[in-house]
Amino acid sequence: MTGRKCFVVCVAILLVSVVSTALFFGAFRGRSIRVACVGDSITELSTYPTDLQELLGSNYYVREFGVAGATVLSDTYMPYIGQHRFHASKDFLPDFVVFLLGTNDARVDNYQSIANFVDDYKLLVNVMKELESNPRIILVVPPPLFENDLNLRNENLLEGIIPGIEQVADELGLTLVDAYAPLAGCPECFVDGVHPNYDGAAIIAGEVYKAF
């Protein structure tokens, strides 16, 4: 084989290798990036996951795994860690997990166990971190609580829930999103003092989107 022919063959082999590698990684990158929205009724019943999907676009696949009444605390009547939708969120093998929990932990009876909040939240997070998809975890500070009939106290958010979430994010090196401050002066963004309306949900989605 002449030197010229050898060069041509080598170039051809190199091109085939490059194209094959590009196709392989292109196919991998072509898979939708999976986003699991984990939470309580604010996730399950509001349009924030849908709004987030619209903001992220078609390269992402956003699914909500909200459970109305769910708590971070494990000794309540509705701990999120014991719910079917938590197991479904793990089976989803997400690339991102957005936790928006803590609102129901601010209920008067649940708040009595606030001393366990940080450890219980870390347990939830660590279960997700052990998934083979190795998801990036995003913690969201819940929106404010206004006058409501659900026995949910905003002072409990401020005094225990929010500091606890900030502690978990700091100690585990997680991304933290604040949905409280942007809605603090916006009671009209809620339908019942707790659950955001379309405007409130869009604000939450916008804050979460910034983390991406």
Image (cartoon, grey):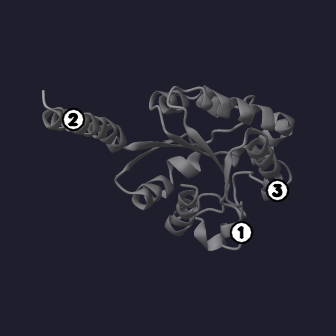
Residue 147 falls left or right of residue 61: right
Q: Which residue is mark 1?
A: 184
Are there few (<14), some (14-19), or many (20+) residues within 10 Å of tag 2? few
In depth, the one of 121 and 57 nearer the eye is 57
Are there few (<14), some (14-19), or many (20+) residues within 10 Å of tag 3? some
Q: Earlier in the sequence, mark 1 or mark 3?
A: 3
Find the distance from the CA under tag 3 to the CA under tag 2.
60 Å
The disc at residue 61 is none
Please determine whether, in this image, residue 169 is positioned above or below residue 129.
below
Are there few (<14), some (14-19), or many (20+) residues within 10 Å of tag 1? few
Task: Indicate the secondary structure of the residue bearing disc 2.
Answer: helix
Q: Which residue is mark 3?
A: 158
Residue 79, can we see it?
A: no
Residue 12 percent coordinates (x, y): 18, 36
Residue 11 falls left or right of residue 206: left
Q: Amino acid at mark 3?
A: Leu
Residue 70 percent coordinates (x, y): 63, 39
Task: Indicate the secondary structure of the residue bearing disc 1.
Answer: loop
In depth, the one of 26 and 125 nearer the eye is 26
In depth, the one of 120 and 18 nearer the eye is 18
Marks counted in the figure total 3
The disc at residue 16 is 2
Q: Earlier in the sequence, mark 2 or mark 1?
A: 2
Please determine whether, in this image, residue 6 is positioned above or below residue 185.
above
Q: Amino acid at mark 1?
A: Ala
* Mark 2 or 1: the one toward you: 2
Please determine whether, in this image, residue 39 is positioned above or below residue 202.
above
Q: Earlier in the sequence, mark 3 or mark 2?
A: 2
Residue shown at the point (13%, 31%) measured from the top left: 2
